[in-house]
């Protein structure tokens, strides 16, 4: 019973954090590994996806109702993310991912330092691309982050938020809204492969999904209520924690 309490609490908190700035995997994946230390990693990643896809989907719906979504970037990015996350999920079941694990903390450190240096980054919504250039940039971002999400996952939402702020000039709030649409696609793409290859504990994943949705609903409403300044602060907090967690996993574990 205590294990289920831990898993459901972790799913709620993961949904809340993920809805605002991404990084829910920072909480949900370690929670699964702590309760099932001897289970195949691919199965735990797959179970995490079934919970996450519902939570991220709920957050996307909430944002779509209350924030003007940049569909011109969200749709092509989501399509590319769907295809490449499937490829990434296939990769993680066949190819070692140690290099990704070791590079990740350094990439996250760059993201944190850049965001701290650019104090006005993401405070205002000032889109800087249009037409075919916007579409191709969205495809590139969606494909790259989609593949990463299928392979590894932690920080996917945070990377998406940062890239939509930095590359497209979106505010943190608008970038968070777009990232949810793209993240739903990455989760579905990876989920198809994990499900087809038998790497999902369905009953547990669906139970955690209920709590992940509850957390994501709370998180998305907090983001909308408090705006881009709040999202930026939480983004930096989550990225900082991710740096230490991924650094420990990559070099000390």
Image (spheres, grey):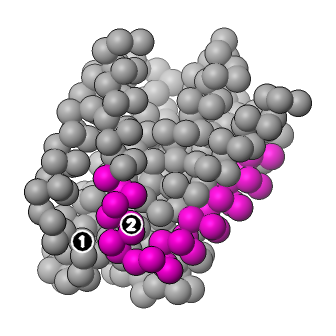
The residue drawn where x is 34% and y is 60% is 233
Look at the image and tell me whether residue 142 can be seen: no
Find out whether residue 44 is within the magenta segment: no
- Sequence-wise, the earlier of marks 1 and 2 is 1
Label 2 sits on residue = 231
Spot the residue most to the right: 1
Q: Residue 96, position in %: x, y?
A: 39, 17
- The span shown in magenta is 207-236
The residue drawn where x is 77% and y is 55% is 210
Q: Quadrant of the N terminus?
A: top right
Label 1 sits on residue = 122
Task: Please give left or right for residue 137 compared with residue 117 in the image.
Answer: right
Rate crowding at label 1 as few (under 14), some (14 to 19) or many (20 or more) other CA atoms within 10 Å: many
Local secondary structure at mark 1: loop
The residue drawn where x is 65% and y is 42% is 10
Vertically, is 206 above or below 31? Answer: below
Q: Residue 80, position in %: x, y?
A: 37, 58
Of residues 30 and 57, which is closer to you in this image?
30
Of residues 209 and 227, which is closer to you in this image?
227
Q: Residue 41, position in %: x, y?
A: 57, 22
Mark 2 and mark 1 in contact (Cβ < 8 Å)?
A: yes
Q: Quadrant of the C terminus?
A: top left
Vertically, is 109 above or below 227? Answer: above
């Amino acid at each position: 019973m205590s294990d289920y309490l831990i898993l459901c609490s972790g799913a709620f908190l993961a949904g809340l954090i993920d809805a605002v700035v991404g990084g829910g995997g920072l909480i949900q994946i370690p929670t699964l590994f702590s309760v099932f230390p001897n289970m195949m990693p691919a199965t735990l990643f797959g179970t995490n996806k079934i919970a996450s896809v519902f939570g991220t989907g709920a957050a996307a719906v909430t944002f779509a109702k209350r924030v003007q979504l940049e569909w011109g970037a969200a749709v092509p990015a989501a399509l590319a993310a769907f295809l490449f996350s499937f490829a990434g999920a296939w990769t993680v079941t066949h190819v070692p991912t140690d290099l990704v694990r070791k590079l990740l903390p350094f990439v996250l450190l760059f993201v944190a330092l850049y965001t701290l240096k650019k104090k006005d980054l993401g405070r205002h919504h000032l889109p800087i691309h249009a037409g075919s250039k916007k579409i191709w940039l969205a495809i590139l971002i969606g494909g790259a982050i989609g593949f990463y999400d299928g392979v590894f996952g932690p920080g996917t939402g945070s990377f998406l938020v940062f890239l939509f702020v930095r590359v497209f000039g979106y505010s943190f709030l608008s970038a968070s809204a777009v990232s949810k649409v793209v993240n739903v696609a990455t989760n579905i793409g990876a989920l198809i492969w994990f499900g087809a290859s038998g790497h999902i504990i369905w009953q547990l994943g669906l139970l955690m999904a209920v709590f992940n949705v509850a957390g994501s609903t709370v998180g998305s409403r907090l983001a909308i209520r408090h705006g881009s300044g709040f999202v930026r602060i939480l983004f930096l907090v989550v990225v900082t924690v991710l740096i230490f967690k991924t650094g420990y996993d990559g070099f000390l574990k």
